[in-house]
Image (spheres, coloured by chain):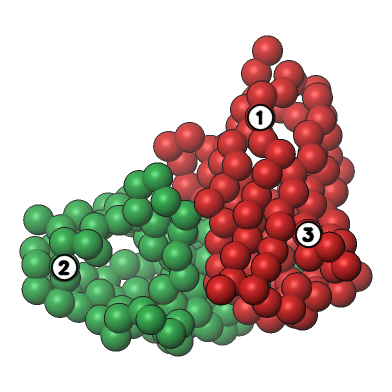
């Protein structure tokens, strides 16, 4: 069974940092791109960042470019996002999602999400 | 990259059909056949319902169908059921990014 499980969320002060992890199982991790998508309270979905299966190609939304860094460890079947210089508007549920292909195209399996709250 | 445009809400009675539109530009919806639709029930993770404009993942009811014309994609749900009541989001590949629509709340009357 394909499964992705996020962890690492929590309360952080503005300007602080946080690293989220996503543990994957049930599929050949290195064969598929992965993405982070967030949802602010009561709002819609916002794609945040994606990474190819090999990890060679990374992509970011303008709203997080320069502050967030996506990475993956294919030996550990784990996806990460390092979030720096956090702002109140980064408060959201962060979902990890598996793609159907090697490159970011279609998100076919989603985790349950981890909540990040940026507040003093 | 701006969000794709969806109606905020649609409604229909059980057994009826509804269509949700998703309007983008030639740089996203109109330029590529990588339009997806997701269903999200309250407090749950999104679920893929349609991919690559018209394809249904295994396990998704054939009451759900997708199409595209120019810069506008559409999701049609036929034979509405109570459990279809949810938020629906479209998304599109846009080369260096992925863009979502603002979401449409479907109410089954």
Colour seen for chain B? green
Compared with A10, B90 (above or below) is below
Work out whether residue A57 can be spotted.
no
Residue B19 in which image quadrant: bottom left
Residue under the point 25% across and 74% down: B77
Colour seen for chain A? red
Q: Position of residue B16 (x, y in %)?
A: 11, 73
- The span from disc 2 to disc 3 (Cα, nearest Å) is 38 Å
- The span from disc 1 to disc 3 (Cα, nearest Å) is 19 Å
Q: Residues within 10 Å of mark 1 (few under 14, many from 20)?
A: few
Chain under numbered label 1? A
The answer to whether dots 1 and 2 both sit on one chain is no
Residue under the point 64% across and 73% down: A26
Left/right placement of residue B51 relative to residue A3 reads: left
Left/right placement of residue B76 relative to residue A110 reads: left
Work out whether residue A120 can be spotted.
yes
What secondary structure is marked by label 2?
loop
Residue of label 3 = A78
Residue of label 1 = A10
Q: Residues within 10 Å of mark 3 (few under 14, many from 20)?
A: many
Of B48 and A76, the residue lying toward us = A76
Residue under the point 71% across and 54% down: A22
The answer to which of marks 1 and 3 sits earlier in the sequence is 1
């Amino acid at each position: 069974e394909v499964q992705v499980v996020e962890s690492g969320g929590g309360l952080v002060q503005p300007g602080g940092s946080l690293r989220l992890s996503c543990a994957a199982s049930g599929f050949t991790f290195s064969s598929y791109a992965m993405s982070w998508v967030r949802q602010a309270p009561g709002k819609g979905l916002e794609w945040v960042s994606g990474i190819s299966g090999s990890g060679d190609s990374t992509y970011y939304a303008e709203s997080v470019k320069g502050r967030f860094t996506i990475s993956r460890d294919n030996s550990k079947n784990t996806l990460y996002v390092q979030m720096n210089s956090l702002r109140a508007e980064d408060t959201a549920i962060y979902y990890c999602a598996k793609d159907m292909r090697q490159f970011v195209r279609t998100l076919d399996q989603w985790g349950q999400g981890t909540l990040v709250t940026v507040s003093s | 990259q701006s969000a794709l445009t969806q109606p905020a809400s649609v409604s229909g009675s059980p057994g009826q059909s509804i269509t949700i539109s998703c309007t983008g530009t030639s740089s996203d919806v109109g330029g590529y056949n990588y339009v997806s639709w997701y269903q999200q029930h309250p407090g749950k993770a999104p679920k893929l319902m349609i991919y690559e404009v018209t394809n249904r993942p295994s396990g998704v009811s054939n009451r759900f169908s997708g199409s595209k014309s120019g810069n506008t994609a559409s999701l049609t749900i036929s034979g509405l059921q109570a459990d279809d009541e949810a938020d629906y989001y479209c998304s599109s590949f846009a080369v260096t990014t992925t863009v979502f629509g603002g979401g449409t709340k479907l109410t089954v009357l």
